[in-house]
Image (cartoon, grey):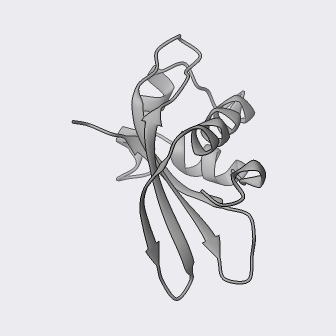
């Protein structure tokens, strides 16, 4: 992914979306990530793991839209509990921007 060394994972994306068990339909994702040892109290650890995921795996798919270019990445995620499940992350480089921004993450169920 271009410029992956400066990828952005926002606090609100982690706390209010990826680790929020009360927000439907994302609650299943949150339960999955929480079961891997990530927590709202240490949301930065999850953000850093997602950044490493974005930097450490190849792009599966690239889609250009009016908002920018989205990149789908799939590979293992290093978790606090020692597991390395395969997840997919989606990043976007907005038009007129350089840094990829995390859009979503979810288990890559096979």
The residue closer to the viewer here, 106 or 26, is 106
Expressed as whole percent of the image width and height from the top left, the position of residue 57 reads 52, 41
In the visual, does 16 lie left or right of 59? right
Q: How many marks?
A: 0
Image coords of residue 34 (percent x, y) = 50, 26
Q: Residue furthest bottom?
A: 66
In the drawing, does residue 110 fall left or right of residue 73?
left
Q: Is residue 36 left or right of residue 27?
A: right
Q: Nearer the viewer, residue 104 or 43?
A: 104
- Residue 95 sits in quarter: bottom right
What residue appears at the point 76 percent right and 49 percent down from the top-left corner? Answer: 5
Identify whether 23 is placed above or below 32.
below
Residue found at the far top of this picture? 82
Q: Position of residue 84 (x, y in %)?
A: 46, 20
Measuring from the top left, give residue 75's x and y in whole percent.
Answer: 44, 36
Residue positioned 53% across, 11% down in the render? 81
Please identify the quadrant where the C terminus is shown.
top left
Q: Which quadrant of the structure image shows residue 94?
A: bottom right
Q: Relative to 39, is 109 above or below?
A: below
Q: Quadrant of the N terminus?
A: bottom right
């Amino acid at each position: 992914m271009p410029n992956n060394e400066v990828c952005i994972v926002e606090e609100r994306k982690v706390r209010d979306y990826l680790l929020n068990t009360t927000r439907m339909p994302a609650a299943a994702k949150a339960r999955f990530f929480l079961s891997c040892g990530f927590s709202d109290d240490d949301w930065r650890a999850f953000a850093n793991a997602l950044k490493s995921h974005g930097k450490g795996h190849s792009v599966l798919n690239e889609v250009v839209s009016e908002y920018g270019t989205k990149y789908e990445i799939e590979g293992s995620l290093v978790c606090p509990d020692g597991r390395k499940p395969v997840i997919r992350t989606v990043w976007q480089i907005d038009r007129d921007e350089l840094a990829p921004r995390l859009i979503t993450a979810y288990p890559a169920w096979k």
